Image: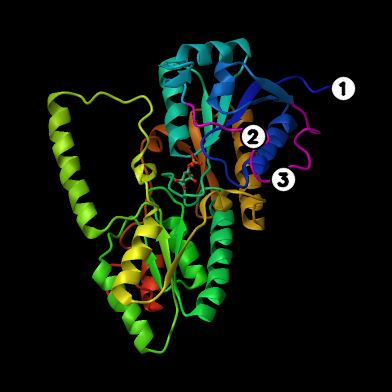
Amino acid sequence: MPRKSRGTIGILTAGGDCPGLNAVIRGVAKAAMHHGIRVLGIRDGFRGLVENRTVELSNGLVSGILMQGGTFLGSSRDKPHKMPVGHRVVDMTEVAVRNYRRLGLDCLVCLGGNGTQKNALRLHQRGGINVLTLPKTIDNDVAETDITFGFDSAMSIATEAIDRLHTTATSHHRIIVCEIMGHSAGWLCLGAGIAGGADVILIPEIPYDLDVIVRSLAHRRRAGKRFSIIAVAEGILSRAEAERRTALGKKQKKNSEKTPAPVAPHAPDAVHLVHEPVASRLARHIQQLTGVEARVTSLGHVQRGGPPTAFDRLLCTRLGTKAGELLAQGHYNIMVGVKGTECVPVPLENVAGLKRTVPPDHPWLRTARLVETCLGDEAV
Ligand code: F6P
């Protein structure tokens, strides 16, 4: 006999993809269906909700996807309140809420990073709908969770890349600068840099000094080490750039207290405004200053592709099934995060709008310094 329906949920994946999204969809859907909840998949993030593009998820549809990279539902970076429609950017919040109600949803489950956490909370606050989020991103920078899914897989890919760069850098006695994603957080670069044994690791949280790096590279040469690997996070800043940014921030804050700044509909964020990849600029300067041949590798979207690691598969299945259980108990407007060994609900208000960067006293930083890795602020 078919189980009595205990409500309907919609599930979407938004923002940049990462390994593990399919594993979470599977976990949420299977656990929710186990409790008699109907599950609708929404295509291409919030855009699919606005455009009413859904697919009914069955046990068969979510079987066999645990190990597949990407998201079979598709993703987009579209926000309901600022959605490009033709040549205009339109607030589609009302349409999204109307469709939520037409579909008979009891909750909208959103898998995403910081942007998605904010968009989900905004839909709840402005549209009165129920939401539940899960922390996805290779950047590992979502607040109120010890880890995000996708991070471990990306860290493994970046570590393997550094391993491969090591052998070629050694053969040619070169410096290789490897650019790693992470937006404005250094978790991915720091983790992969330590795991791959990079000689210099530069992260956005620690503004770098070029002289310090050059002195550290010279020290390695004097010790007979004729190659060096520099792991660079895409969001790094030199000390001078960081000072300029702080001064600009203060000025903007002062001005915005007088008149609020107009919001550009398609303003690209600071990291992606950089025309020359940050690693190329750095490699050029280092080659000039050290006289040693330097090369650049930018890992780019390779870090977001392919299957999730075993760690991520387990994490995703735990997070997804926990979400399914919480939904069955009627817990909404929360993010399911990781605290210690547990998957726990946290109020979405405590997450949205915050960013978890590497704190100055994080043990990984001490670890790196103890194995003589230069972090760009002190010479080794
Ligand atoms: O947030 C994940 C991430 O991969 C960041 O590390 C990176 O800065 C950004 O997305 C790249 O975005 P896109 O896929 O839109 O180029």
Query: What amino acid is found at the position of numbered circle 3 in the picture?
Result: Leu
Residue 180, percent from left and from top: 46, 57
Residue 329, percent from left and from top: 60, 29
Residue where numbered disc 3 is placed: 66
Query: What amino acid is found at the position of numbered circle 2 in the picture?
Result: Gly
Which quadrant would residue 82 be assigned to in this image? top left
* Magenta span: 57-78
In the rendered image, is residue 7 in sight? no
Marks 3 and 1, Cα distance to the nearest angstrom? Answer: 28 Å
Marker disc for residue 102: none
Earlier-in-chain disc, 3 versus 2: 3
Mark 2: few/some/many CA within 10 Å (<14, 14-19, 20+)? many
Residue drawn at (58%, 59%), measured in percent from left and top? 157
Residue where numbered disc 2 is placed: 324
Marks 3 and 2, Cα distance to the nearest angstrom? Answer: 16 Å
- On screen, residue 310 versus residue 296, left or right, reads right
Mark 1: few/some/many CA within 10 Å (<14, 14-19, 20+)? few
Which quadrant would residue 89 be assigned to in this image? top left
Query: What amino acid is found at the position of numbered circle 1 in the picture?
Result: Met
Residue where numbered disc 1 is placed: 1
Residue 26, percent from left and from top: 70, 38
